[in-house]
Each structure stands twice: as structure tokens, then as C-alpha cells.
Image (cartoon, rainbow, N blue to C red):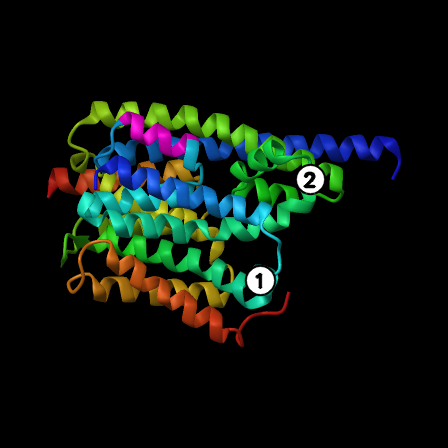
């Protein structure tokens, strides 16, 4: 590849990363506000964005605590951990991309391994562009996500009675926004519908938090047996 | 258990998972079936969270302002409305219904 094309592909990766970073940062406001509405304080909310730094697990943790309080703590931990399992797969895909440069470098890469940094890296045509895309996206989101989390938490704190502002409905809409891009395949759609039904049916029977975990069994069964594949379009 | 305990344990678990992908020799999860289950796990948990967040109040099922708000949110995502706009509109729909109902 000529040098100018290499430069262009690196610039493209950098641009992708910053664009995705800015778009994702906006989610932080809703996370911060919802977290405070669920009963966490501003420090706890910011700690999650700084250290946990994986949106799905963060939303799940505050969602389960919001529904069941500290009594549902075990379920909140399990839900956050189960939603973090996909990061193991992302990490394995990003390992050859970031290279092997010592422990600190690998820990930093692991920390920044999330949906968006992985997606931008995988979308690049060259190894160098993939590496640039991964780091630029990860760092841009890390900065934006933490700033907007703090902002959202302060706004949520100032609002007071959050139910009157519809923040409980906003939480459901936020989860739907995380789910929506994953529903392109029939198998995923069927899993989502079944899991929602299982969680709903289990709600009157089990303590708050557990219905969400029981619904995870749907993923195990559908994934293990590879159900709902036949009607999928090829490609 | 306090909220901080929940936060610290959950954070340790999610960080360990992130590190596992980068540090543990890859083999098991690279196979098709575990990778597929990991993928569907995310879908199932998010869908279950939506159901609970929309219909549950403790251990009772309640249909209230959250349901129309979620329907509006789904319609907006279907026409590719940005996340933050959808979340704000969903909150406004629920708040509006509660104000006037």
C-alpha cells in the first residue's frame, strides 16, 4: 500500500474513533442520572464509569439495585458480570490488534476493551489503522463517558423525585437502545422475546433481580442448541 | 452488604473478565458455541432488564406510563433516532402521562 493510503487509513481510523466517542459520551448523561435515581450517590456513580467502564454492566447494576435495593445486591453483581462476559470475546479479538508490550500496556488495553473500541478496530482495513482505531475510540469514550456521567449524576441529584420526571421509563428506553443494534438476526430477536417473557413471568414468583438472571438461561439454551437459525437470510 | 460492596465486587468481576480476554490463552471462547452463547447472553439480559424495568414494581406486574413510553422509544429507534433523544423523549412521555392522568 502506498504511503499516502496508509496515512489516509490512519486518519480515517482516528476520525471514526472520535465520532463514535462523541456519540457514546451522550449516553453517560442518562447513565449518571439513572444511577443517582436508583439510589447510588454521585461518587459511586462516577466510580462505576471510571473503573468498571462498560456501559451494559453499569446500566444493569443500577437497574437491578433500583428495582430491588441492596437486598438484590447478589443479583446486581451477577447481572453486571454476565453482561461483561462478551468483553472476554472482545479481548481475545483485540489481543493481536494491540500487540504484546508488557503488563501495563495490556491492562490499559483490557480496561478500554468495550463494544465500541472493538467495533471500530474491527472495521479498519489495516493492522495499524485497527490499532489506532482501538486506542482513539477507547480513550475518547473514556474521557467523554466519565465527564458526562458526572454531569448526569449532578443533574439527577438536583432533580429529586425522579419518578415524576419519567426516569424509570428512561431506563427501559436506555436498555432498549443498547439492545437494538443486536437484533439484526432472527436468533437474537427470538432470544430477546423469550428472555423478556421469562423475566416477566418470573417477576411475581422470585425476589427482584433474580428474574433477569433466570432469563439468561434462554441464551444458554438457544446458544447451545443453535436454535432459530433456519429462517435467516444468508450474508 | 452495602451499595459499595455490590459496586466493588461487580467491578472486580467485570475487570477480571476484560483482563481474561487479553491475558488468558485463547482457545475455549474462540470456538463457535461459547462465542455464540456469550453474544446471546447480552441480548437475553438486556431484554429481561427491559421487561422488568417496564412492567415490574417490586414483585407485582403493573401496566402504567412506562409501557407507552417504551413503545414510543421503539418507534424512534426504528427510524434511527439518536440514543440520547430517545431516552429523553421516553422520560417526557412517561412524565407527561403521569402529569395529566
Badge 2: few (under 14), some or many (20 or more) residues near its Cα, within 10 Å? few
Residue farthest toward the right in the current orientation of the protein: A2
Q: Give the chain letter at badge 1.
A: B
Left or right? Give the position of A90 relative to A180: right
What residue would you read off at disc 1? B28
Which numbered marker is on residue B73? none
What residue would you read off at disc 2? A100
Asked if residue A48 is among those painted magenta in the image, a careful observer would answer: yes
**Residue A189 visible, this orientation:** yes
Q: CA distance from mark 2 to mark 1?
A: 20 Å
Write the residue at 19% across / 34% down.
A162
Q: Residue A151, image x and y in percent?
A: 35, 23
Of residues B57 and A217, which is closer to you in this image? A217
Please report the bounds of the magenta region as a residue range: A42-50
**Quadrant (top left, top right, bottom left, bottom right) of the C terminus of chain A:** bottom right
Q: Secondary structure at mark 1?
A: helix
Write the residue at 16% across / 35% down.
A164
Amino acid at each position: 500500500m502506498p504511503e499516502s493510503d496508509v496515512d489516509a487509513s490512519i486518519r480515517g481510523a482516528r476520525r471514526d474513533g472520535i465520532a463514535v466517542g462523541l456519540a457514546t459520551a451522550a449516553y453517560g448523561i442518562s447513565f449518571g442520572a439513572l444511577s443517582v435515581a436508583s439510589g447510588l450517590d454521585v461518587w459511586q456513580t462516577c466510580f462505576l464509569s471510571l473503573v468498571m467502564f462498560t456501559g451494559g454492566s453499569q446500566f444493569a447494576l443500577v437497574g437491578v439495585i433500583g428495582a430491588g435495593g441492596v437486598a438484590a445486591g447478589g443479583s446486581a453483581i451477577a447481572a453486571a458480570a454476565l453482561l461483561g462476559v462478551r468483553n472476554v470475546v472482545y479481548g481475545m479479538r483485540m489481543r493481536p490488534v494491540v500487540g504484546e508490550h508488557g503488563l501495563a500496556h495490556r491492562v490499559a488495553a483490557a480496561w478500554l476493551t468495550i463494544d465500541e473500541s472493538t467495533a471500530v478496530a474491527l472495521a479498519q482495513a489495516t493492522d495499524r489503522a485497527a490499532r489506532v482505531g482501538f486506542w482513539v475510540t477507547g480513550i475518547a469514550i473514556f474521557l467523554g463517558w466519565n465527564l458526562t456521567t458526572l454531569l448526569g449524576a449532578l443533574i439527577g441529584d438536583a432533580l429529586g423525585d425522579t419518578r415524576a420526571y419519567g426516569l424509570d421509563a428512561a431506563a427501559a428506553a436506555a436498555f432498549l437502545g443498547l439492545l437494538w443494534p443486536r437484533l439484526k438476526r432472527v436468533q437474537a430477536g427470538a432470544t430477546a422475546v423469550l428472555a423478556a417473557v421469562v423475566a416477566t413471568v418470573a417477576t411475581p414468583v422470585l425476589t427482584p433481580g433474580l428474574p433477569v438472571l433466570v432469563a439468561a438461561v434462554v441464551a444458554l439454551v438457544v446458544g447451545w442448541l443453535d436454535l432459530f437459525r433456519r429462517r435467516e437470510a444468508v450474508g | 452488604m452495602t451499595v459499595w460492596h455490590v459496586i466493588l465486587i461487580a467491578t472486580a468481576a467485570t475487570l477480571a473478565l476484560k483482563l481474561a480476554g487479553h491475558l488468558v490463552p485463547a482457545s475455549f471462547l474462540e470456538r463457535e458455541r461459547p462465542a455464540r452463547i456469550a453474544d446471546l447472553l447480552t441480548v437475553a439480559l438486556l431484554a429481561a432488564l427491559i421487561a422488568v424495568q417496564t412492567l415490574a414494581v417490586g414483585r407485582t406486574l403493573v401496566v402504567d406510563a412506562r409501557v407507552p413510553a417504551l413503545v414510543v422509544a421503539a418507534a424512534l429507534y426504528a427510524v434511527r433516532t439518536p440514543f440520547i433523544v430517545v431516552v429523553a423523549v421516553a422520560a417526557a412521555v412517561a412524565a407527561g402521562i403521569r402529569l395529566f392522568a
